[in-house]
Image (cartoon, rainbow, N blue to C red):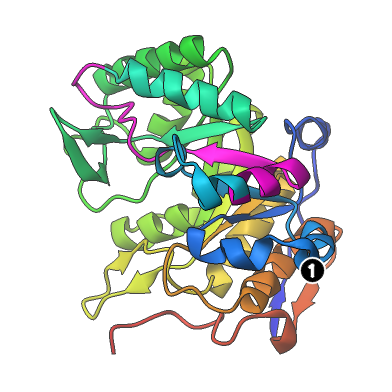
Amino acid sequence: MNKITTTSTLSTDSLSREASSPGIQGAGLGLRRALLSSLTGKDVVETSKDTFDFFEVAPENWIGIGGRLGRQLKEISERTPIIAHGLSLSVGGTAPLNTGLVKDIKSFLDEHNMPIYSEHLSYSADDGQLYDLLPLPFTEEAIKHVAARIRQVQDILERRIAIENISYYLVPEQQMNEVEFVNAVVKEADCDLLLDVNNVYVNSQNHNYDPSEYINQLETEHVSYIHVAGHYREDDGIIIDTHGADVIDPVWGLLEQAYSRFGKLPTLLERDFNLPALSDLTNELNIIKRLQNTNTQQSINLTPNQKVAGAHHEQSAA
């Protein structure tokens, strides 16, 4: 049995931000096509609407999709809020911003009444897609560059967006540390922050910093919602952000710390492959809800039947 405790208290500012999170609350799940048949149809509607507070999709994977898949997405969006999390806009890149894609995303958001759009603090294209999320240099020049592009996206979308702290394995140049860079970008861009607590943990292990201190240094007024996920530890100790494993205890602990600091913000469970049974994903969603609904000055116990099997173990290559 794992015991998670915290002694932090919520500030008035955190409570007000929690209450004002736009359009979503509670615990959500990344919507994968493999899950659609389990989430649509009259027999599952009543059950799923009580289990999933919201879903998240990558708009690039759904824009222009019709037929059966399009109908299933529409069915889900009519009963459960859906938010959008982009993969390929490359807001930190040097190639011209793909304004055509931004306009398509705007239409997609409007069609499905999606209250949130987020992207990654990275670049992913250079005269063509690189199919990876690559880190930006932690420099003043990069702050001004990416912030200007985020503002351009917000102007086209006519809404604020959230930018996610990414996992990274090399940094081109550093004039400051990661959390200073993230704080500076969201302040300069006047955007929100999607806090990925698994990425904080992964980076802290790979780059030898204190993940708890990272969360303490984030500026509270910018954080709008949270991602949590699993990862994979290689034989050499490097941790890869895979979204293909169960969430481990240290990441759950960081999530609880985040709630203590920022309020019970909406939280999305990411699982992109090695998909377990839907009931196992539901178990992890229940952990999120327990953490959200437990007084932050009390301890909570996560019993084995509230966890997916092996959630407390690192994934290894062995």
Residue 261 in the image: above or below residue 251: above
Q: What residue sits 80% from the left and 43% below the top?
A: 10
Query: Can residue 234 be seen here?
Result: yes
Mark 1 element type: helix
Quadrant for the C terminus in the image: bottom left
**Which residue is most to the front?**
67
206 or 210, nearer to the observer: 206
Residue 40 in the image: above or below residue 217: below
Give x and y (percent) for residue 106: 51, 21
Q: What residue sits 58% from the left and 44% below the top?
A: 216
Amino acid residing under circle 1 = Asp
Q: What residue sits 60% from the left and 46% below the top?
A: 71
Q: Which residues are magenta?
A: 72-96
Q: Is residue 212 left or right of residue 294?
A: left
76 or 161, nearer to the observer: 76
Query: Can residue 217 be seen here?
Result: no
Give x and y (percent) for residue 7: 77, 58
Q: Is residue 102 left or right of residue 304?
A: left
Residue 162 in the image: above or below residue 279: above
For label 1, count other residues whose C-alpha is less than 10 Å away and answer few (under 14), some (14-19) or many (20+): few
The quadrant holding residue 103 is top left
Give x and y (percent) for residue 76: 68, 49
Residue 184 in the image: above or below residue 287: above
Residue 92 on the magenta span: yes
Which residue has dot 1 on it? Answer: 43
Quadrant for the N terminus in the image: bottom right
Residue 143 on the magenta span: no
Q: Is residue 250 left or right of residue 171?
A: right
Q: What residue sits 64% from the left and 68% below the top?
A: 38
129 or 119, nearer to the observer: 129
128 or 65, nearer to the observer: 65
